[in-house]
Image: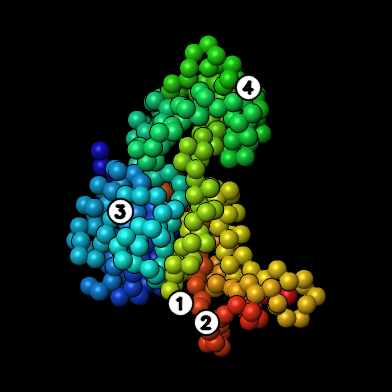
Amino acid sequence: MDFHHKSVLLKECIDSLCIRPDGIYADGTLGGGGHSLEICRRLSDKGRLIGIDQDGDAIEAAAGRLSEFADRVTIVRSNYCDMRLRLAELGITSIDGVILDLGVSSYQLDEADRGFSYRADAPLDMRMDQRQQLSARDVVNLYSETELTRIIRDYGEDRFAKNIAHNIVRARAEKSIETTGELIHVIKESIPAKFRAKEGHPAKRTFQAIRIEVNRELDVLRDSLDDMIDLLNDGGRICVITFHSLEDRIVKECFRRNENPCTCPPQLPVCVCGNVPKGRVITRKPIIPGEEEMEENPRSQSAKLRVFERRITDPENRSIRPGMPAWGRQT
């Protein structure tokens, strides 16, 4: 099946990258190659794009879509959390920009057999990398009631997490839960009828929570952003598109911390902690899709783009070094 995915905030993201024609760029969530294609169109024959994705279907689709730029594109099947290692294997130690388009792709949602969607009955799966062992079936049938409650509450932000977890455990005691349809039935029975119609599909939050757990999405994001910022050359930018508040919060806090890492008491006139800013936040407020894009692509409605720029020199062009007053410090 063709890998269809409509790139969200495409123009805004490409504009925010401030692409250098001879630069090196990494797309950590290659998907169908929509963002990467626009990056390649702006690169000279000296420029380079490294596309990374853990989904085999995405790799195959992107390779075809980017074939006209094969001389400047390298595609790697991996998780973006291993970006530094994968780049090092290619002899690359620094880059000029990174893009992450997080969450599940349109193809993954639409391909029923992948088990991501609550709109079709399919085997419970939800693995973005189908080489990995842990699947949604394992989470649903093997996790304890306490673990399920935590996941659905924290990752799905569902007020009925305890009820849902309890009913999952009760249902699987009689028969293992094998399909999305079976899981949806349990979820619906766990939510009072008056709330089902008000807050969208009743399974939406639980499916999000299980998918995040299966793919370790928040841990991977939290553990990767600092490393990606460190990979950037002076003036290089990282653009991250998120689709729910948990992701957005991680990105926002990371960018803010890298801009202002000072831990000194606010009454001190000069920074003495030695923590050095790595750059500046470009987006004080996230960039969101316009009305036209949201109408054309409903899945873009929750998207937020945040951008951070690496600065290895301060505004007066002095090299930043440990012990210097932090020019990014907020007082």
* Position of residue 310 measured from the top left corner of the image (x, y, whole percent): 50, 72
Mark pair 2, 3: CA separation: 32 Å
Residue nearest the observer in this picture, 11 or 19 = 19
Separation of marks 3 and 1 at Cα, in angstroms: 25 Å
The residue wearing badge 4 is: 166
In this figure, which residue is indicated by the disc labeled 1? Answer: 234
**Is residue 204 toward the left or the right of residue 88 in the image?**
right
Pinpoint residue 144: horizontal percent, then vertical percent.
59, 26
Compute the Cα span from label 2 to label 1: 7 Å
Specify whether residue 193 is in view: no
**Residue 313 image label:** 2
Judged from the image, the secondary structure of the residue bearing numbered disc 2 is: loop
Q: Nearer the viewer, residue 108 or 136?
A: 136
Q: Given the image, on which type of amino acid does mark 4 rest? A: His
- Asked whether the residues under the numbered discs 2 and 3 touch, taking CB atoms below 8 Å apart as contact, a structural biologist would say no
Other residues around mark 2 within 10 Å, as few (<14) / some (14–19) / many (≥20): some
Front residue of 111 and 47: 47
Identity of the residue drawn at 56% across and 84% down? 315
In the picture of the structure, the residue carrying the numbered disc 3 is 76
Classed neighbour count for the residue bearing mark 3: other residues with Cα under 10 Å, few (<14), some (14–19), many (≥20) = some
For the residues bearing labels 3 and 1, Cβ distance under 8 angstroms: no
Give amino acid for label 3: Val
**Residue pictured at 48% horizontal, 62% vertical:** 227
